[in-house]
Amino acid sequence: MKKNKKMIIRPGMDYLTTLVAKQRVIIPAERLGGAKEDFNEMITFVGASLNPSVGNADTIMERLESVDFGKPVKTRLVAFANVSAAPIRLQIENDEPIYFDLYVTLSPTVESPGETIYRSQDKRSGSFESELSLSPLFELRPLGKGNSIFIDTGKTPLPGFPMRLGTAGGKWTCSAPTKNAVRSYGGESLFYSTEVYITALANDKSLLAACAKRQAEFVTSIDRPSFERINFPNPKEYTNIELERWMHD
């Protein structure tokens, strides 16, 4: 009698695109180049195109170990790029208000590690729950003249960071849900068959962040994803430092 071979899902990259995200952002005035007061708002974000482009992916998660169902698998974010859905407003001392696009990418100085537990339904699909520690790099890019303000939370943390993000009830599958689903260049891809909901809570249990993501797809310049900001300019060169390093290693 032949023994059943154990299902092995090797390490690899998984690709997501952001539908919408809300995040509490608190930045002290002294970090904002002469702002009159601290910035403290719940901001709505959308996905920004990665550079180099990987379809409409704005989030790439790397599985660092082979999947053993029911046991934690080490992961890390290797790419992440969101941008405020609308410009934010800062009142600078003795000047007119200045409007900025607020980018959120990954800190170039520290990792954003996590772990995921995959559960099997039929060894080809199932559910998962995950946790992640997010240390972002914020860029406040002025709409008019002036220089961007960069805040690396890996060097000097802001209130709420590193942020502990968690998701439960997500669905994974070994089969691509659409013909254009983004696949891993190396290793093995898992795909997301349903929307993935991610949240983060403060110590007092208030909501720090909530977002919805789905499986990323390859798209053309004509077939733009409907949830991307219309006529939004390309992000700065090498939006995500970790992805740029990975593509050139």
Image: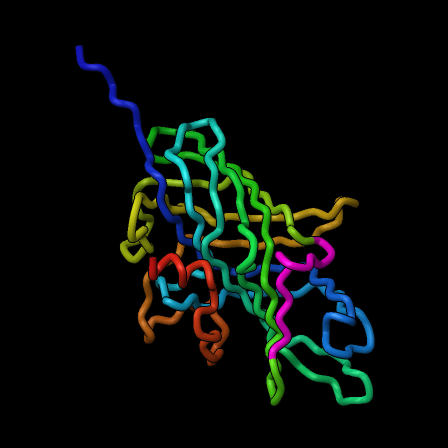
Residue 128 vertical placement versus 197 (above, below): above
Image location of residue 204, percent across then percent down: 79, 45
Secondary structure predominantly adopted by residues drawn in magenta:
loop
- Image side of residue 170 versus residue 215, left or right: right
Q: Residue furthest left?
A: 1
Colouring scheme applied when the structure was drawn? rainbow
Residue 12 vertical placement versus 102 (above, below): above
Depth order, front residue of 168/178: 168
Depth order, front residue of 249/125: 249
- Image side of residue 76 versus residue 148, left or right: left
Image location of residue 75, percent across then percent down: 47, 42
The quadrant where residue 94 appears? bottom right
Depth order, front residue of 185/202: 185
Q: Residue at x 46, y 35 (%)?
A: 73
Verify whether residue 171 appears in magenta.
Answer: no
- Image side of residue 221 versus residue 148, left or right: left
